[in-house]
Image (cartoon, rainbow, N blue to C red):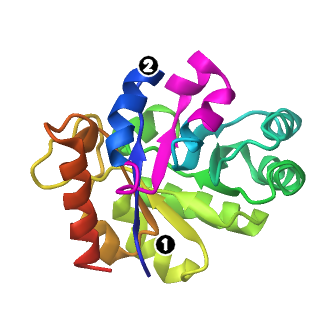
Amino acid sequence: MKTELILAVDLDDKDAAKSLLRPLCGKVAWAKLGLQLFTKYGPAIVDEFADLGFKIFLDLKLHDIPNTVASAIKSLRGRPCEMLTLHTLGGATMMKRALEAATDALPTTRLLGVTVLTSMDDNELAGIGVPRSPLEQVETLAKLAVAAGMKGLVCSPLELPRLRKFLGEEIALVTPGIRPKTAGIDDQSRVMTPAEAAAAGASFIVVGRPILKATDPAQAALAIEAELRSVN
């Protein structure tokens, strides 16, 4: 299984983001756009970054009643995004309605179910009334999502071995919380290096600050790509 790198463009200024991304065109295939840019500039931001030559992972983490999530997906009709996130906590009905909407409005887009955010640990889960460990909660939500028809999940790299064991290779597993050995963990609680995540079965790894804040972002991205190739 080949593991691909996704660059997380977690910035709030599109011109600054484009300046950082242009030297990475042809070196990194994927760019993740999140709420910061999407809420500031609107859906057209997806087209702008796709026009730079990147495949777009639109990380909106949709979570609402089924009709609202389905309508939100329909509002993205025709946007060039290859992957789009929604929260599995929204339940099976919400995910099924989302998949139905995407079949019509975004037929080439893979919907990804977010399980437990990588910033959350046992204490954080207990604080919102979830008595399970992150791994137990991830497994519960992963099984719910796959039963609803989802073909991809977002999880911590630490959950990869268990998920791969019962999901096989058909389900795409996208893992944030990736930090090269030389980088700090920032606000992530459950992390791995790129090579460790690839070896554990990640389909995609998501890396932001270790690339964007590097003295030479292009070189930092190439170093991660080389690390992945050593495992893939």
Q: Is residue 28 magenta?
A: yes
Q: Nearer the viewer, residue 25 or 41?
A: 25
User: Compared to 20, does 189 lie above or below?
Assistant: below
Give the labeled residue for mark 2.
13
Say which mark, if any, is on residue 115: none
Give the labeled residue for mark 1.
163
Q: Secondary structure at mark 1?
A: helix
Q: Nearer the viewer, residue 59 or 155?
A: 59
User: Compared to 215, does 80 lie above or below?
Assistant: below
Indicate the amino acid at tag 1. Leu
Figure quadrant of the N terminus: bottom left
Q: Name which residue lies at 46% across and 44% down.
A: 117
Q: Is residue 18 left or right of residue 39?
A: left
Q: Is residue 37 magenta?
A: yes
Q: Name which residue lies at 27% across and 37% down.
A: 212
Which x, y percent locates residue 52? 51, 42
